[in-house]
Amino acid sequence: KAGISCYGDIVLNHRMGADKREIVRATPYHRENRNEAKGEIYEIEAFTHFTFHGRKNAYSQFQWHWYHFDAVDHDARNPEDTSSIYVFEGKTFDDYVSSEYGNYDYLMGCDLDFENEDVRDELTLWGKWYLETTKLDGFRLDAVKHISSWFFPKWLDEMQKHSGSSLFTVGEYWDPRIETLHGYIEQTNGTISLFDVPLHYRFHEASQTGDTFDMQTILDSTLMKERPDLAVTFVANHDSQPLQALESVVEPWFKPIAYALILLRREGYPCVFHADYYGAEYSDTGSDGNDYQITMPSHRQMIDTFLYARKNFTFGKQHDYFDHSNCIGWTFSGDDQHPGSLAVVLSNGSEGSKEMITGSPNTRFIDLTSHVTESVITDNDGIGEFCCNGGSVSVWIEALLDK
């Protein structure tokens, strides 16, 4: 009723919490080199039989057995061995996956065998049931670099035919290298958007290095710049936050700058992180084995300001001024339906200013963030000198159009 589209978070690569164990022959492989076996094949006891007794065959009669998977990383007969991945007899790791560790098909739990036709059929059946039950508008696909790249275009085609509508889909391919994401886009024929992980790492680096980072390059080698049509932009997420699996912290001082870059530009489909909006407090164990208390501050006020500006003023021509190593900016000229101009200026160093053109001559502008209290008046050509504080961002709108 609120006009919000809902996307389902789909985790298809691995399963955990089996109902029964099965005896199966398997070969142990090194975690760090999935192309090298550690020893000969032998019997292991694996948690691979999923009966779903609570389901009582209501939606599907399918039960998962060891032969629906490629590998596991736990042998109940030898639980002390945490360095092996056990590949089942007659199985190999799936192809067309990330080449990390030689082959990064296996991530955790019971690794699905996408070469198995019964597996693919059950995933399609489940997907159709899920759509019918939830009426979803699209999907977030988890850990796609561990799943054969040829699978999802076929699966999504079946889902879209079943739903009778286009289903927006974004994949989580965690790799900071832009060429790797380009490769996946090519393999999936551009059918899946991707989270702009390289952009996140640019934010991470910029927040760590302060005013030595060249802000002219902040968007270089990112999907936002090179494939904006398929870029889902984000500042941080549940994996990158402190003490988590892919820890790559964007420091709090830089987050307003980063959110301005994803929320107040035309390129990309921006995603706001819950913990950045509401804040978060938690304790967890670091890689050194010590416990830490983490506090993530809320940036709600600034994010709300950016969202208001995005909704009302990011229209017309976008003019970029990425011409200084610390202070950059851009403007929107507005259009016939949205006549208000917008000017954004930010700095990762000392306070700065930028002479920029708007679509509004002889007009007074005010800083929507209230960081700068003095107003700016454009000249006869719509050009004004817009400024911001050091390590900060200011969003300038026409005074009469203020909320």
Image (cartoon, rainbow, N blue to C red):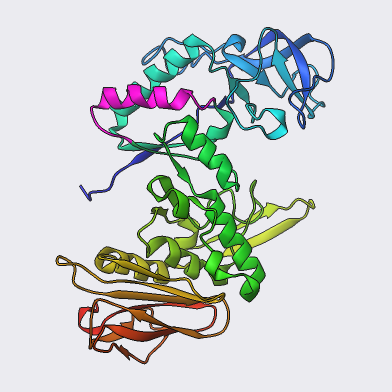
Residue 31 position, x and y percent, is: 76, 29
Q: In this view, does 138 lie above or below 198?
A: above
Tell me if residue 195 comes above or below residue 304 in the rendering.
above
Residue 312 is covered by the magenta coloring? no
> Is residue 162 on the magenta stretch?
yes
Q: Where is residue 148 in the image (x, y as percent from the top left)?
A: 54, 25
- Tell me the magenta residue range: 148-167
Which residue is at the far right? 39
Q: In which quarter of the image is residue 91?
A: top right
Say above or below: 8 vs 13: below
Front-lying residue, 365 or 329: 329
Front-lying residue, 342 or 29: 342
Location of the C terminus by quadrant is bottom left
Residue drawn 41% across and 26% down?
A: 153
> Which residue is outermost to the bottom?
374
Q: Quadrant of residue 361?
A: bottom left
Which residue is rendered at x = 48% and y = 24% of the image?
150
Majority secondary structure of the magenta segment?
helix
Q: Position of residue 329 (x, y in %)?
A: 43, 74
Q: Which residue is drawn at 53% across and 52% down?
A: 237
Q: Is 189 situated left or right of 205 in this image? A: left
